Image (cartoon, rainbow, N blue to C red):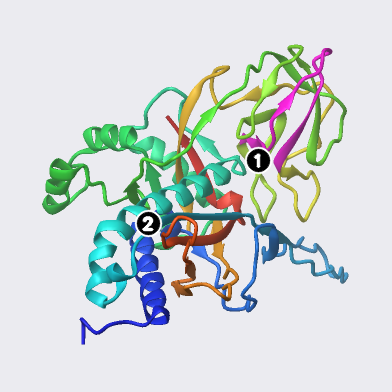
Amino acid sequence: MANQTLTSKQAAAIISKVANSILHDKLQFLKAIRTEDNAPWTRDDYKPGDTIKIARPAQFSVRKGRVLAPQDFQEDTVPLVVDNQVGVDVSFTSAEIATEIGIKQMAKRVLEPQMAVLASAIEADVMAKAYKRVANFVGTPGTTPATFGVYGDALQRLDENLAPMDEERFALINPAANNKTVDGLKGLFNSQEAIAKQYKSGYLGDMNGFHFMRNNLLPIHKNGTQGGTPLINGAGQSGASLITDGWSPGATITAGTVITISGAQAVHPETKVAYPYLKQFVVTADVTADGGGNATLAINPPIAATTPKQNVSAALVDNAAITLQTGAANGLFPQNLLFHKDAVRFITLPLMLPDGVDFAAQETVDGISVRVVRQYDVVNDTLPCRLDVLYGSAVVRDDFMVRLTG
């Protein structure tokens, strides 16, 4: 019966399951990306800092002619560090959770606002980390997106990077972009029902190959002081480290800054035919130029001028000009995210269930695990309860995500 008195073990399991269900309902971005199945990870004592490997498709070169040219099969992997343990804590009495009715009342009063805060914290963190690994960049810094064309630019970039042309492309845009876009595109190619939703709630729905969602947790990129006339320092550079000079002494370049390099055009991922625009690279760690204006940039993707991983049309030349794409020095610019579901991977792993406590339980819903632990505090005569999630994320296919600035 619904009002049957529960054991501590039963109460713990129900609280964990209810909290997990509420958390899952509050998520948006995480439901639009691929959640890694945690079933193969069978331990129950993972901790922050543990790492798993996520596979990326191998790349190959096409042989020309009749002579056999075997290639080694080398599947790339991306490290996914489970480096975040987050939670919310509360104290409540045994009487409040003695029955299922009591738990349901507590869920509405306590768990729902707790899980809403937790969901926001997790999603904001995952998106803030993700954008700093993504070099694909469209739009004009300082101009809020409002036209069909600018979303088409993002769609074009995903198509040219061979993102699957299916129903798993999403566009997360901030409230300002949503407002301007609804106003700019109201009624365009939409049914009367969709137009009505636009007027009533700012709904965009499906447009230009994306499922649109409004999100107020999207990251804002802050530029460094920048300055100078940055140049490539040394011909033929490749990989994820770029030696540069020509910066203003002490100039700062922040993680997430997008650059292009003169003469390094983007190429088709398979045919390696050059596209009519420069390849974009993202700086992945903050850096400060020395007194002589020299700086070594950590970048993504790694530069490759030869097959099979070739991503630029020609090897870099010395003193090639570097152009910053992400706006004015010290500027703050919103980053809307348009992506395929396979771009980012997210996982939660089970935490240790301690012995000798009042109760402890852990439940998984759609690959997301939430642990609940309650213990009596003899000093303060309270029953503190903690809810924890151990998670990690990684950009697995950065070419399947595009940043639309505002």
Q: Position of residue 322 (x, y in %)?
A: 70, 24
Question: For the view shown, which residue lies furthest in the bottom direction?
Answer: 1
Q: Earlier in the sequence, mark 1 or mark 2?
A: 2
Quadrant, the C terminus? top left
Was residue 155 drawn as part of the magenta stretch in this picture? no
Kind of element beneath mark 2: helix
Magenta stretch in the rendered image: 277-300
* Crowd around label 1: few <14 · some 14–19 · many ≥20 (10 Å): many
Q: Is residue 152 shown left or right of residue 231?
A: left
Mark 1 or mark 2: which is in front? 2
Identify the residue shown where x is 64% and y is 49%: 268
Q: Which residue is mark 2?
A: 115
Q: CA distance from mark 1 to mark 2?
A: 43 Å
**Magenta: predominant secondary structure element?**
strand
* Crowd around label 2: few <14 · some 14–19 · many ≥20 (10 Å): many
**Quadrant in the picture for residue 95:** bottom left
Q: Amino acid at mark 1?
A: Ala
Identify the residue shown where x is 31% and y is 53%: 113
The disc label shown at residue 209, or none: none
Residue 18 vertical placement versus 229 (above, below): below
**Residue 136 visible within the image:** yes
The disc label shown at residue 266, or none: 1
Q: Position of residue 307 (x, y in %)?
A: 79, 53
Q: Amino acid at mark 2?
A: Met
